[in-house]
Each structure stands twice: as C-alpha cells, then as structure tokens.
Image (tube, coloured by chain):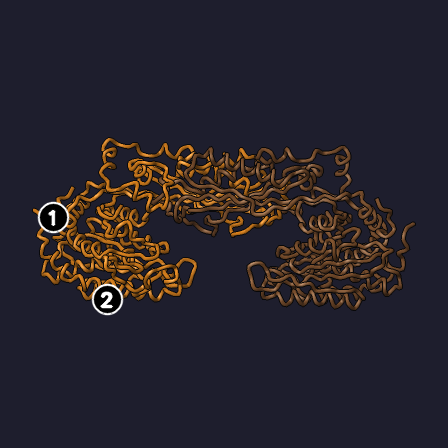
Chain colours: A orange, B brown
Amino acid sequence: MAPQLDGYFQKVDAMSDAFIERLRQAVAIPSVSSEAARRPDVVRMGHFLADELTKLGAQVELRPLGKQDGTDLDLPPVVLARYGNDKNKRTILVYGHYDVQPAEKTDGWDTEPFELTVMPDGRMCGRGSTDDKGPVLGWLNAIEAHKAAGIDFPVNLLMCFEGMEEYGSDGLDDLINAEGKKFFADADAVCISDNYWLGTERPCLTYGLRGCNYYSVEVWGPGADLHSGVFGGTAQEPMTDLVRILGSLVDTDGKILIPGIVEQVAPVTAEEEGLYDNISFTMETLHESLGSKTTVFDDKKRTLMARWRNPSLSVHGIEGAFSAPGAKTVIPAKVIGKFSIRTVPNMDIDQTNAAVYRYVEDVFKKLNSKNNMKVYAQHTGKWWVASPNHWNFTAAAKATERVWGVKPDFTREGGSIPVTLTFEQATGKNVLLLPMGSSTDGAHSINEKLDKRNYIEGIKLLGAYLHYVAEEPMN
Amino acid sequence: MAPQLDGYFQKVDAMSDAFIERLRQAVAIPSVSSEAARRPDVVRMGHFLADELTKLGAQVELRPLGKQDGTDLDLPPVVLARYGNDKNKRTILVYGHYDVQPAEKTDGWDTEPFELTVMPDGRMCGRGSTDDKGPVLGWLNAIEAHKAAGIDFPVNLLMCFEGMEEYGSDGLDDLINAEGKKFFADADAVCISDNYWLGTERPCLTYGLRGCNYYSVEVWGPGADLHSGVFGGTAQEPMTDLVRILGSLVDTDGKILIPGIVEQVAPVTAEEEGLYDNISFTMETLHESLGSKTTVFDDKKRTLMARWRNPSLSVHGIEGAFSAPGAKTVIPAKVIGKFSIRTVPNMDIDQTNAAVYRYVEDVFKKLNSKNNMKVYAQHTGKWWVASPNHWNFTAAAKATERVWGVKPDFTREGGSIPVTLTFEQATGKNVLLLPMGSSTDGAHSINEKLDKRNYIEGIKLLGAYLHYVAEEPMN
C-alpha cells in the first residue's frame, strides 16, 4: 500500500519560506575547507548543523578528527546524529558534507557567493546551495516538516555530515571504518545526496561510479636544468622521452593502448544493452556542457557507455617542464608526467597498475635512453556499482515517481565519490545515490545554484523515500 | 714585427689592485635588468661607466632607448663612447653589457652576491663578475694602463655597452641598425667579450653561433577545462593530441624526425674534419657540467659537431596543462606545446618554419582529431658564422698566444648571442667573440665568479689584441 504522503507534502510547501531561510543561513557561513583561514567558519557551520539537529530532537555528537595531514590545523568535526531509536523501524544512514569550494565575487559571480540570492526564475544562487548544503538541510527539513505535520517519522535516521569533502575528506575513512559496527551498526541501507541529475528535467538514481587510478611517470637525467643552446643535441633530454611515453598511452578517440586494461572490462549484458536508449540524455546537452562538438562518439548510447561503463585515460600535465606563457629555452632535468585511468567493473586495481607499469617500462626500454624512468600510482580508488534492484533503490524509484510524476533514470557516473564505496564496505549495506540538484547547477563553478523547485520537491523526495523505504519488502 | 707590449703588461700587473677595486665598485651596484624595482640601479651602473670613461678621456653619450615594451618603465640608457679619433689608426667597435642576472644570497650563494669576494684560490665571486662587468671593465682598464704607462693607444675604440642584455636587449637592435652608418661608421672590425672558454685552461676565439627558431603548437577543443570523471572517454582531449605531436618531433638520440631540416645542413668539409681533434675539450668535462653521463654520443668529435654545427630540437614544456605537484584530474581545454630548433649553416629560417609547419600539420591530420591545432614560430634568430681567417681573428690569435703562451681554440657555440649577427649586418664588418672567463664561471648561476688570473690576463689580452689588430695586414 502506498504511504500517505499528502499531509507531509502540504507541510513542506507551507514551510518552504522557512526552509529557504535555513539554506540562506547556511550559505552565509563561508565554510571553505581548502583555506586554512576559513577553518573557523567550517567549524561554525558544523556547530550550526548540530544546533539545528538538537533543536529538532536529534541526538548529536561533534566528533573531532584530529589534525589535518601535515599541519597543526584541527580538522572540522564530523556531525554524527541519530533521529529516532525504534527497534521496529528500519534505520537509514545518510551522508552529506557541510564544507564548500572556494568562491570570490571577483571570480566572476553575478551575485555575492555567500549570500543566497533567489532569482525570479527560481534559481537560488550561492556557494554550497547545491553542493551540498541544500541536500544536507533537506534531511533536517524533512524531519521538521514531519514534526510540524504531526506525522510519525517512518525510519530511524543516522546522519554523518563531514566538513572536509572538498579537500580530500581527510580523516573520514578511518571514522567510517571505525563506526561501521558501532554508531552505524543498525543501518539497514545508506543514502547519499551529493550528486546531480544527468540533465535538467528527469530525476535519477545513481548506482555506479567509476574508480580512478592516478599515475606519475618521472624521467630524469642531467643534474640540473640545462640551456638548450649549450646542450641541445649532445644530451638525451628527459622531455623527449616523456612525451614519447605519454604519446603512447591513448589515441585521439580515447582508445587505451595499454594491453591488459580493456580485457578486464565486464562484458555488456543483454539487459544492459536496453538500458541506454531510455536515458534522458541528448548529444546536444553534452555538446552544450562541453562547449564544443569535439566528442569521440556522435551517438548517445556509445557516449553513455564511454562515460559510465568503460575505462578512460586522460593525460593531465607535466610537472617540472616550462609551463608559463612566453618562450624559455630550457632543457628540464627532471619531468613528471601525470595521467589517470578511470576504472570500471571488473577492473582490479593491482592488475591495472601492473599492466600500466609493464607497458610504460616497455615503451621506455624501447627508447633505449640513458635517462632514468620511474612509473607509480599516486593514488588509486576502486569503482563502485550497487544493485539497482535492491529495495533501497525500489523505494527511491517509487518516491521519485510519486514526487516528480516520472520514473527516474537509473544512472551511473563517470567520476568518483570515494566515500560511497567506504560506506558500502564499512556497513556491508546497499548504498543509493539520490541527487537533489540538476546538471546545470555548476557545483564547483561560479554562480553555483540550486533551483527552488529542486530544493522543495527534493525535500519531499527525501521524506517520501524514507516512507517507501519503511514499507518496501526486503529483497 | 711583434708589438712592444712589455711595458703595458707590467703596468697592468702593477695596477691590478685598482682594477679589482673598479670591479668591486661595479659588482656593488645590483643592476638587475629583469626587476623593475632595480631599474634605478641599472641606470646608476650606466652612469658609473659613463663617468669612468669620461675620466679616462673618452667622449661619452648616454643614449635613451624609450620605454620598456608594454610598460611605462624607462629603459636604461646605452653607453656609447669613443676613445681616440685618429684617421691613421684602425677603429675597433666593442660591445658589452652592464646589467646582470638576478641574485639573492638565499638562492644558495656562499657569499653576498653584490659584494665582490676574492677567495684565496683567486676566484672573485659576485654577480656580474664574469657576465659581463669584468670584460666591460677590461676595456676601461686597458685604456687606463696605456695612459699610466705612457703608451700610445693603438686604435680608435668605439664602445657600445647596454643595460638590458639579460632581459632581451629591448631596443638595442634598432639603435645598432640606426648607428651602423653613423656612430659605428668607421669601425673596421667588431669585438665582443661576452662568452666563455670551452674549458678552464685553453683560451678560445669564437667564430660561430647557432640560431634558434622557437615554436608553439596550440591544441584546443572544449570550451573550458573539464573533469576527467565526467568527460573522460567521451571528449577528444587536446593533451592526447599534443603529446602525440610532441612525441613525433625528435628521438631519444636527438635525431630530428621532421623532413627538410637536416637536408639544409652544410656538408662537413675535409678541413673541418680535422678541426675537432685539437680542441681542448673532454667528455669528462662535459659529463661534469651535465651532472650525468646521459650524453647522446660517447666521443668528443661527434659531441662538438652536435653542439656547434648540427641542428638540435628540444621540447621545453606545455602551457595550459596541469603543472603543479600532486594530482589533479583535469582535462585541459587548451594546451600549448613549446619546442625550439637550434639552427646552423646553411639553414634558412623560412624554409625551416615551412618544414616544421608542414610536418606538424601532417601529424595532426593523421590523428583524425576534431580538436583545433595551430603551429607557429614565437621567434626566430639566424645562426652566425664568421671567417676565422680574417685579420681580426688572426690578431686575436696572436695576442692570445702572446698573453697565454698557447694557441687558442677556434670554437663555435651551441647557443645564440643575437647581437653578434646584428653588429655584423649593421656594420658589414667581421665580428670576433673574444672571451675573458672560463667554462666554470657560472654566469647565470649562484656563486658566479671570475678568476683573478682571467681578469688580469684578460685585460692584457684585450690591450694586446688592439696592438696586433693595428699591425695586422688587411685580408
């Protein structure tokens, strides 16, 4: 039987001004985690959340994480909260982050970045509006609307809100792993609202993310940078070797030339073949977000497969070479090429590293160079794919259809949200990514916004999801 | 008949403390041309030279050069001076520069860079000691020693000392070209003392320099930098195309892979074949200055030919890509590769550019990329080779043998001193490079020094050269 949600929905609509006011207060706190000088603001934002949650009746803890790596700076605390402790209810663990990317008006913002500005067309502009203060407050607003409407909250809610997501989530993995069988022990499923719809009209549920293995290739020979007039033609140049290595990794159409990578990729199933056609995505939208038509493929299906389920290799740059405007006739003594591979099922991190090392070493050996070469992974992170048939997803799909009137797209993403896999592994439970914002929100850009519609309907969606989750049969 | 030089030499030795004191005063003026804040010091250095020259009886002019390109900053003046105006004497035009490279004690200097420090082993450490204040003062000291010894100065001396050499010689070419048939009109030959011996023991005369064509290859596609998670595999990446282009230009052993370059190189004559064996140069010295054994060749002859008479291609770096330490998963939207070709006789600038453009365009076309590509020369400068059989060189060789007791090496250099060619073209006269310092002076490095021996014997050499020049029959 479908849950009775009309009372809740009406209350959310009735309280929408208060909810926007709460978002305004949150955006006004410039909780930029990457800037040491802003650390007190990040901490203040954590306390703001803790206070709001306490007022709503949650049990709240501000968990210290110690010092930031390599500094004397205290990390902002993780807000751990519990709302409800009824053994007869399911328990849902939700994650979000209360820190934001840097922003200055002078970066090109049309409005003050730390003043939420509601435009006539419904855009609510401000740093953190969509990433991730809007979604985090969505959970608080859902609790408040239930209380105000006198509707029993359908689940026990565990909350984990961190303040360092935009700067590497320093310290969080340890906490999640430590609390997997403690604070998070009775979680039946996990829900993260920190990503975006594929477009602007169709909501989605996300069940997969690519991983990322990031590599460095160092080539060095001379004792110091050289003058190309004096040494050009007489010394073997590290840059010559490096660009030949980097030029051997991938072709213009993104085909990875390293043996042993694509061989690991899971075959496309017949079921999967049918998935792509229905996804709300067009090449026009892609060209628009790309700012050009320089795509590898001209069709939607191969493009989505390339983004979601196939690995890709990008060359990011070179450290140690001349990188400024103008002309400098230097022969760099040591250069470090950077590239990464986005990984997908069923790629294995170690097997992928081994294939990369073997290939790069082979290419270098064939150059017959007297220079030295070293290739290594700077960091690795596994791909993540959940079962979209799990009751957690079924509940979210029903809630989406109820709130938005359409079936959601079931999507994967090309990027990584490492905490997703951490939660899955620490709790052993299904993790759902349930986005609130849309593809045009500009999370890390100037003029970041959350549409008022997405915020208010998003609050309804998060609450509705919890009702459906409470009723969904276990599978 | 050999000139009578003993009196002059004795006077130089007797006055050596005063000459070192003059160098100390010059080094104490931090005439760093690349730093706007030091511009008054550069101007002060120009005035110091002008005052010293005036006291010695020269006619001196401080010639303004207008504003520095793209700034409101006055360029330091060129010191133009004439010493002697006897129609029965030959007239020699000498060039040097009175500005220096930047230097801070904290860069790693063992001594204060702007305090000349004479070490027990004879090293005189200080910024500008060898590049180029020592040689410039060498001419002044030669005049003074002649006056003090009561010896008639053997030639008319025209002097051109600039204050922007270390920052591109802004404005100088125009002045030289304008004065070629005016202030410099009666020059019979040109002598520049602004380079170095090939090693530390054998003096040299330099009769050739390579030219330099500096290229940019721009590749661009997307409208802005992209996230490799979102776009990796779906967009054609400019870096992928660029590293493939850069990787196609030259091999590990320095072989230029662009057709139409080596084809332009002058064949080795039988006479040239015999030149290299006698040059005072060892692979051990090269390995020492390189800081490694990563040379292309293991023998002296091919190494000297590679540096002096063959073209080379160096890849310097990439603008627009990720160049910092650490990891960033960016797909750069626009990247600019920088490389240059050192040119030699009989390479033609336009023909070389055309070969480069054609090749890079071909390589890019074969990539079948949707990105855009543009290749162009940032700047070009022709090679220079003078006749070492000219009386200007013969005189310098005799003077060298008289002062140092050995025949000089006749050398070419791999780098460029563009003003050399400008003087040759503006005056139509033979240009000689007559170095004072040795290969270990560290001109642009920390602990720059000029050996006391090289300074004092160098003053003798400059004076002796003028005596031999006065007597040498025209050829």
Q: Residue furthest top?
A: A270
Q: Amino acid at mark 2?
A: Asp
Q: Residue furthest right?
A: B1
Residues at discs 2 and 1 in contact (Cβ within 8 Å): no
Which disc is residue B31 wearing?
none
- Neighbor class of circle 1 (other Cα within 10 Å; few <14, some 14-19, many 20+) is some
Is residue B275 left or right of A269 when viewed as pictured? right
In the image, are marks 2 and 1 on the same chain?
yes
Which of the 4 image quadrants contains residue A14?
A: bottom left
Position in image of residue A144 (x %, y %): 16, 61
Q: Nearer the viewer, residue B262 or A395?
A: B262
The residue singled out by tag 2 in the image is: A51
Q: In the image, what residue occupies the spot 77% across and 45% down?
A: B409
| Secondary structure at numbered mark 2 | helix
The residue singled out by tag 1 in the image is: A471
Which of the 4 image quadrants contains residue B62?
A: bottom right
Label 2 marks which chain's residue?
A
Q: Determine if residue B221 is in view.
A: yes
Q: Nearer the viewer, residue B233 or A180?
A: B233
